[in-house]
Amino acid sequence: MSNTALITGASSGIGREFARYHAGKGGDLIVTARRQDSLNTLKAELEDAHRIKVTVIAQDLGSAEQAEELYQRVTETGQPVDILINNAGFGGHGKFHDRDLATDLGMIDLNVKALVTLCHRVGGDMRARGSGKILNVSSTAAYMPGPLQATYFATKSFVSSFSQALAEELRDAGVTVTALEPGFVETEFADRADLNGTDLTSSGATPDTVAQFGYDAMLKGQLRAVNDRKLGFALNWVIPNMPRRQMLKMVRKMQEKNA
């Protein structure tokens, strides 16, 4: 029985841990990211440890066109994708008008457009077969606007909203869609987003625990999955009832650099 997972952003962090967890369950993999060497290292590790098949496709998903190209390359392998994990994405710190516009537009391309493209193409194949699971990596950022990370927070709000709507549309077709919404995770994300030195990164979960939590939630067909129960309570019951200006100031303070 086929059990192949396509994982984007698989060369490090949560994506790499998704691959390890899936392989540990005996599933084959198609892993993609920009870094060919890192993917090849992961392939060797997992094939040796678990005797499964790992297909490496080095691809920069910085645009919808490149996501289309990835889909075509996956199709050419002849392997049906049973699980799609959209993990690739990045953030960026700073006031919107102080940031490079092209960088933020690239963030939208990767965090939103590439994800939507793969959900349409791979998810469409799942619908036609009558089975499949999609896990879209969102963030607790989906629950609020994000001063000093305005574009990133907005992209994650889109991902969570889109995932829930898609889940309802695909439910009768035997396909589930889950949005994983972790808090801060100790990965390369903080370095790339220039978030070190903020309260937001003072503590976080490890990528392996987040990957396992999200993967298991996907298997259960959950709509949304926050890896921290106390944080989930605050996001659903405390923050929505805060005065809007107070909430915005709180989020901004979390992301300001400490002196």
Image (spheres, helix red, strand yellow):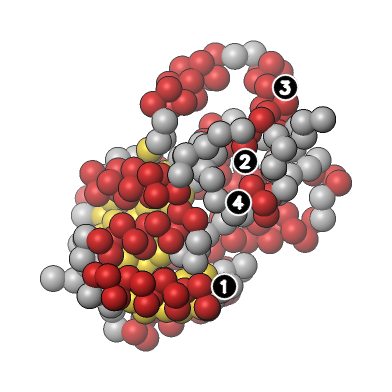
> Mark 1 — residue?
34
The Cα atoms of the two marked residues, 1 and 3, are separated by 36 Å
The local crowd at label 3, few if under 14, some if 14 to 19, many if 20 or more residues have their Cα within 10 Å, is: few
The location of residue 15, given as percent across then percent down, is 45, 59
Badge nearest the viewer, 4 or 2: 4
Q: Nearer the viewer, residue 99 or 124?
A: 99
Using residue 109 as the reference point, say whether residue 213 is left or right of it: left
- Which label was assigned to residue 143? none
Q: Which comes before the other along the chain, label 1 or label 3?
A: 1
Q: Which comes before the other along the chain, label 4 or label 1?
A: 1
Badge nearest the viewer, 1 or 2: 1
The location of residue 109, given as percent across then percent down, is 62, 61
The local crowd at label 2, few if under 14, some if 14 to 19, many if 20 or more residues have their Cα within 10 Å, is: many
> Mark 2 — residue?
153
The Cα atoms of the two marked residues, 4 and 3, are separated by 23 Å
Badge nearest the viewer, 4 or 3: 4
Label 2–label 3 contact, CB within 8 A: no
The Cα atoms of the two marked residues, 4 and 2, are separated by 14 Å
Three-letter amino acid code at disc 4? Phe
The Cα atoms of the two marked residues, 1 and 2, are separated by 23 Å
The location of residue 150, given as percent across then percent down, is 70, 40
Three-letter amino acid code at disc 2? Phe
Question: As drawn, which residue projects farthest toward the right?
Answer: 98
Question: As drawn, which residue projects farthest toward the bottom?
Answer: 76
Residue at 77% over, 31% down:
258
- At numbered mark 2, what does the secondary structure look like: helix, strand or loop? helix
- At numbered mark 3, what does the secondary structure look like: helix, strand or loop? helix
Q: Quadrant of the C terminus?
A: top right
> Mark 4 — residue?
189
> Mark 3 — residue?
249
Q: Say whether residue 9 is visible.
A: yes
